[in-house]
Image: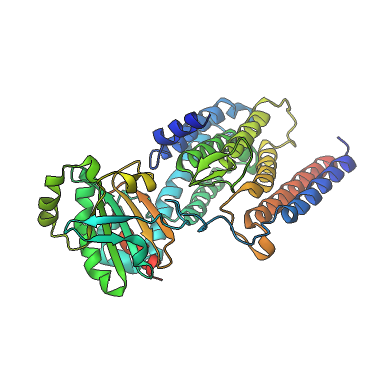
């Protein structure tokens, strides 16, 4: 190819590329982030209403204005067991700054009689919610246990951590972010 | 088709999607080794450069994350050695990885373009692996669409941007692997960089997670256009030097 031909082709590519940037600009001025509820970073956290161990009902959207860690767990899951004590320590440390934990037990695939002894054994003081039908797990597209969703004060998922156990530093860095 | 994608996403759901990246790394290194004799670099040097790059990436990513969150790690120092992959600074890791590679290349007096050309099959394989891992994790997702080939993802029918990305990466790989040229000025690396920058410039338009700057302009497209301009300029400079010689 002649040098002049090559230069012209390069120039044409760059001009078309530059024009494409403006033609394909998102006129709405915002990406699809946050518009629809989905269990993914940047989206609005799907709402749920579940019963606690004490029989009360807790709704995620009622906690808007607080930073929330939604942790999906089961008693038979070793990494879930391993991270519960750390979550409790962190909860005690941050709860006065507008942070809460919703530990949602996957009751539909757990042994309900094992839940209360587990909570006492680990001295857990944050709300334990029961997903008896699997509806919440379905809305959060659960694929592995534990799964943790860090939700900021506006109800947007800031971070998703699949698997565990989560290190103390990981919990602290993510909680500091959602409290901002 | 949607059943296959769904099965794939279940099979390689995070954190298993990282297997795809590791497999791409392994395949890419194997392919780069197969072509190493075409470039002025030994197989040992190629393996070492990848090894130091990975070491710099992994260690640097964790160290920089710790330094950025020092107050947190002072309270729980054992977390420094945690297996949590999220305790990582990916951009910093890229920088330290490149630093390690540059230090090794300078020490061994490796030629820049030959080394980059020898590594191009590896880069191309990683691009394929990255697209597959995006598909598995549902990241780098598309904007909502009514087109018949849209996929159900994050509660909407979306452009399958991960599949667009995969097709672009496979085409770039095929183009690099099967082209017939022995000319030293036709750099594999520059061609690959131009193809990938062009693909990103075009495909970013269909993404639903773009970072927008003024007027709804997508930041990734601006960066891709700049990369494309630099690559075309570098290619032109190499041709000019070749003509003068």
Could one spot residue B21 in this view of the protein?
A: yes
Does B219 appear above or below B41? below
Q: State the residue in front, B221 or B175.
A: B221
Q: Residue at x 50, y 54 (%)?
A: A36
Could one spot residue B49 in this view of the protein?
A: no
Q: Which x, y percent locates residue A26?
A: 66, 57
Q: Which x, y percent locates residue B14?
A: 39, 42
Does A128 appear above or below B6? below
Q: State the residue in front, A170 or B9.
A: B9
Check the image and name the residue furthest to the bottom. A96
Q: Quadrant of the C terminus of chain B?
A: top right
Q: Is residue B122 left or right of residue A48?
A: right
Q: Is residue B184 left or right of residue A113?
A: right
Q: State the residue in front, A24 or B36.
A: A24
Q: Residue at x 76, y 53 (%)?
A: A18
Q: Quadrant of residue A48?
A: bottom left
Count how many numbered circles sit on residues in the image: 0
Q: Quadrant of residue B240?
A: top right
Q: Which x, y percent locates residue A60?
A: 34, 61
Q: Which x, y percent locates residue B62?
A: 39, 54
Q: Quadrant of residue A138?
A: top left
- Looking at the image, what colour scheme do you see? rainbow
Does A32 appear above or below B150? below
Q: Is residue A64 left or right of residue B210?
A: left
């Amino acid at each position: 190819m002649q040098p002049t031909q090559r230069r012209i082709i390069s120039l044409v590519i760059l001009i078309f590329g530059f024009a494409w940037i403006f033609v394909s600009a998102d006129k709405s001025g915002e990406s699809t982030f946050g518009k629809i509820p989905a269990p993914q970073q940047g989206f609005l956290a799907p709402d749920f209403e579940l019963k606690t161990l004490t029989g009360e009902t807790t709704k995620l959207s009622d906690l808007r204005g607080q930073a929330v860690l939604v942790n999906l767990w089961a008693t038979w899951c070793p990494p879930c067991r391993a991270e519960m004590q750390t979550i409790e320590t962190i909860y005690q440390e941050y709860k006065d700054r507008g942070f809460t934990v919703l530990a949602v037990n996957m009751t539909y695939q757990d042994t309900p009689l094992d839940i209360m002894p587990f909570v006492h054994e680990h001295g857990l003081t944050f709300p334990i919610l029961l997903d008896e039908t699997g509806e919440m797990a379905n809305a959060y597209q659960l694929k592995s246990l534990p799964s943790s969703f860090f939700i900021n004060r506006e109800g947007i998922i800031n971070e998703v951590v699949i698997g565990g156990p989560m290190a103390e530093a990981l919990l602290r860095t993510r909680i500091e972010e959602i409290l901002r | 088709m949607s059943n296959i994608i769904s099965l794939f996403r279940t099979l390689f759901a995070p954190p298993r999607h990282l297997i795809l990246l590791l497999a791409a790394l392994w395949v890419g290194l194997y392919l780069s080794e197969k072509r190493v004799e075409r470039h002025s670099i030994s197989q040992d040097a190629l393996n070492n450069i990848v090894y130091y790059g990975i070491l710099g990436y992994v260690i640097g990513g964790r160290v920089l994350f710790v330094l950025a969150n020092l107050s947190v790690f002072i309270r729980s120092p054992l977390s420094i050695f945690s297996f949590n992959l999220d305790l990582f600074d990916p951009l910093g890791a890229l920088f330290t990885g490149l630093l390690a590679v540059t230090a090794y290349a300078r020490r061994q007096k490796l030629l820049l373009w030959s080394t980059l050309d020898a590594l191009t099959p590896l880069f191309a394989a990683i691009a394929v692996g990255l697209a597959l891992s995006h598909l598995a994790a549902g990241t780098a997702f598309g904007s909502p669409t009514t087109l018949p080939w849209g996929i159900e993802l994050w509660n909407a029918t979306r452009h399958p941007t991960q599949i667009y990305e995969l097709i672009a990466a496979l085409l770039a790989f095929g183009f690099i692997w099967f082209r017939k040229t022995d000319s030293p000025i036709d750099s594999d690396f520059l061609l690959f960089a131009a193809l990938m920058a062009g693909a990103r410039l075009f495909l970013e338009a269909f993404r639903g997670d773009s970072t927008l700057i003024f007027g709804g302009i997508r930041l990734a497209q601006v960066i891709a256009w700049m990369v494309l301009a630099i690559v075309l300029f570098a290619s032109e400079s190499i041709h000019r030097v070749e003509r003068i010689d």
